[in-house]
Amino acid sequence: MSGFKLGIVRLGRAAGKVKYALLDERDISLVENYAFEARMDVDKDGNGAKLYAYAYDVNKGRNSGQYLQDLLWEKHCGGVAPGWKVVHRNGVTVDNRLENLIIVSDGLVDKHIDQPSNKANREQSLYWIAVQQLQIDPLEQHFPDHIYNKYYNCNGEIIEKEEDNCVYYECHYPPCTNIEKEIREFSICGRCQDVRYCGTYCQQKDWPIHKRHCRDRRRQSSAERPPDR
């Protein structure tokens, strides 16, 4: 990757973790006028959910924005006609390098996407490599329990707090983009009962960082319980 330049944009916390998006070097200047955040698109037929990068002009407000892949496609290739959709070739929905984007008709989306759930595919993806090299987020490091976290229900709506029966999670290991296809599909950390993983591989890889914040929930609750009156 010598001489290779890439933009990495922090999207904030969503679905249980801090999310990032990749940009080509030529698109990094977007950060001067646009704000970025993570947004979830829930399949209405019950086939899980996906997280995307959402961008909006800071002078026009959040409601003026659009998914980042659509913004970039329009910027470099022109508008998107009805019945067509901009998708990510490697299945990583926050990898918004132009070479990873392709426009396809709505009915042929799945035929043009590699599934990142395949271990070999995801670990060879540029997103996996780039995010794996990031240092721990400074806000996450100093204020792990006080960062606003977006929770999404089964309708893709943002809710105020976690509800056990209707929240989708993404695997907590930063470079992994696997997201639950069913509510509570992923295993939960048995100690803190807070973060979730798609499998033991990601849980083991994440442990050197997660152990700094992992606390036994039962002990934590006992310590925070107000004194009897």
Image (cartoon, helix red, strand yellow):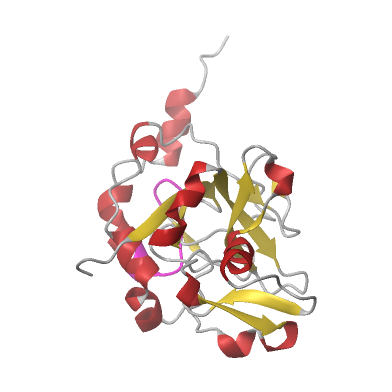
Residue extending furthest top?
Answer: 229
- Quadrant in which residue 107 is drawn: bottom right
What is the span of residues highlighted in magenta in the rendered image? 190-204
- Residue drawn at x 29%, y 42% is 212
Q: Is residue 117 above or below residue 137?
A: below
Q: For this rendering, which residue is in front, 49 or 185?
A: 49
Residue 80, position as x, y percentages in the image: 71, 73
Quarter containing the N terminus = bottom left
Q: Residue furthest right?
A: 82
Q: Nearer the viewer, residue 54 or 211?
A: 54
Report whether 171 appears left or right of 15.
Answer: left
Quarter residue 67 falls in: bottom right
Q: Could you say where residue 180 lies in the image, as x and y percent from the top left?
A: 57, 67
Q: Position of residue 186 (x, y in %)?
A: 51, 65
Residue 162 sits in which quadrant?
top right
Any magenta on residue 194? yes
